[in-house]
Amino acid sequence: MIKWLTRGLLAATLSCLSLAGLQAAQVDNVRLWAAPDHARLVFDLASPTQATIFALDNPRRLVIDLEDSRMAADLVGIDLDGSAISRIRTGVRDGNGLRVVLELEREVDPRHFSLAPNDQYGHRLVVDLEYPGESAVKDPIDPIEAMIREQEIAANRARVVTSDGSVSSAEATSPPPALQKAQPHPRRDIIIAIDPGHGGEDPGAIGPSGTREKDVVMEIARRLQRLVDDTDGFRAVMIRDGDYYIGLRQRTQIARDQKADFFVSIHADAFTSPRPNGSSVYALSQRGATSETAQWLAASENRADLIGGVDGNLSLRDKDEVLRGVLLDLTMTATLNDSLSIGGQVLDQLGRINRLHRSRVEQAGFMVLKSPDIPSLLIETGFISNPDEERRLRDSSHQQSLARAIFSGLQDHFRRNPPPASLLAWQRDNNRRPGGNEYRIQPGDTLSQIAARHNVSTDRLKQANELNGDVIRVGQVLRIPRT
């Protein structure tokens, strides 16, 4: 009887030890993505675990301690190029823990969080290494261009021109500015922010043959970038220029920081059925989606932030940020009409090279489009879930045609409606009939005031500048006809 109990206790003890071993977290894989302003390290885990992270100096290191864990991944093949990490070392900590040491080449601001399993991955520990003071884009905009753009935005927000030409703003009550000769035109580039969707650990949709959305849209985006940069008066800013993840709100913030005139997010999404095909163009809807497909796509794109480790909402930890978010949403309507107008022209160009999934610009609640002072579009170049369209999306000539169609639509709009301080506006002004003087519009000006100062009628001033209405913009150059 005693022997039987002894054998039973021993078996139970071994079973418990075995179970404890099975419950220990195992790191099955380690993935790294390097971005200009941060690096993301992802540990794929067999089961969840607790992590502690702290920094050490002399030399600079970041220590990641995982409780009750062991390393089963091969770290030799990890490409550290472009990241702040020069070497990764691992070792056993306190008998059953795992210590990972990152040897660093620069200062970092670390943060970490855990992610639950989804359709693509199991349990994950994400460690973000943010680089203080670095820009998310490799070529930040020139400060002078940024200043010009900021002045335009601030002045245009402050002025509201009524139907009778009067100005409703605080500036209207100030004394009118003295007459001044137009200063040399800035002739700045029109800045196009190009956002290849997804990236890093978020591959986006995956086609029947394994084509990843993040790869296809990056190719199209780079082709679009070259078209933009090769055209006088335009400049491209890539929201991401490599295989790394950027949050949805951060994408729009990068565009705003770079003073973009237009934001285009490029995708190649999937649907629950392989049948849908064709290109679509989406603008923001503040009241919901305009079709069931639009609603489904918006939900799938917005879920990308769940992969990135955020819930898609503004953090309540920073009240100022929340207030900014509210203000952004309140002013969204100001650019929605421009978005729809540009979207119509892009859709027309896409229809010349590809079947259209919808014949009009759709509207849905895409978070990535929520920027108040930048017209924005999300373009679904095709359905990667359709086998035939997946094949075409991989084809380099079709990718080039898609990029050219997108840029042609943008060009059509901006040539007709160039920002006042842009090279295209200067070219338009110089192509008008010669003769007369010029006047650059100042905050508080109205057409009727400018006409009175120069002793010409408002109608004649409009005719000389091909104006259909009374709305004018600060920085715009008006040709004053001779009396």
Image (cartoon, rainbow, N blue to C red):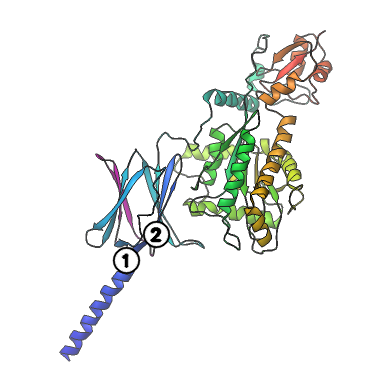
**Of residues 160 and 259, which is closer to you in this image?**
259
Q: Name the residue under label 2.
A: 29
Q: Position of residue 68 (x, y in %)?
A: 29, 62
Q: Which of marks 1 and 2 is nearer the N terminus?
A: 1
> Mark 1 falls on what kind of element?
loop
Question: Does residue 330 appear in this view?
Answer: no
Q: Horizontally, is 80 left or right of 422 in the view?
A: left
* Residue 93 in the image: above or below residue 281: below
Assess whether residue 138 is covered by the magenta stretch: no
Q: Name the residue under label 1.
A: 24
> Mark 2 falls on what kind of element?
strand
| Type of secondary structure dominating the magenta stretch | strand
Question: Does residue 62 appear in this view?
Answer: yes
Neighbour tally class for label 1: few under 14, some 14-19, many 20 plus, Cα within 10 Å: some
Q: What residue type is labelled 2?
A: Asn
Q: Quadrant of the N terminus?
A: bottom left
Q: What residue type is labelled 1?
A: Ala
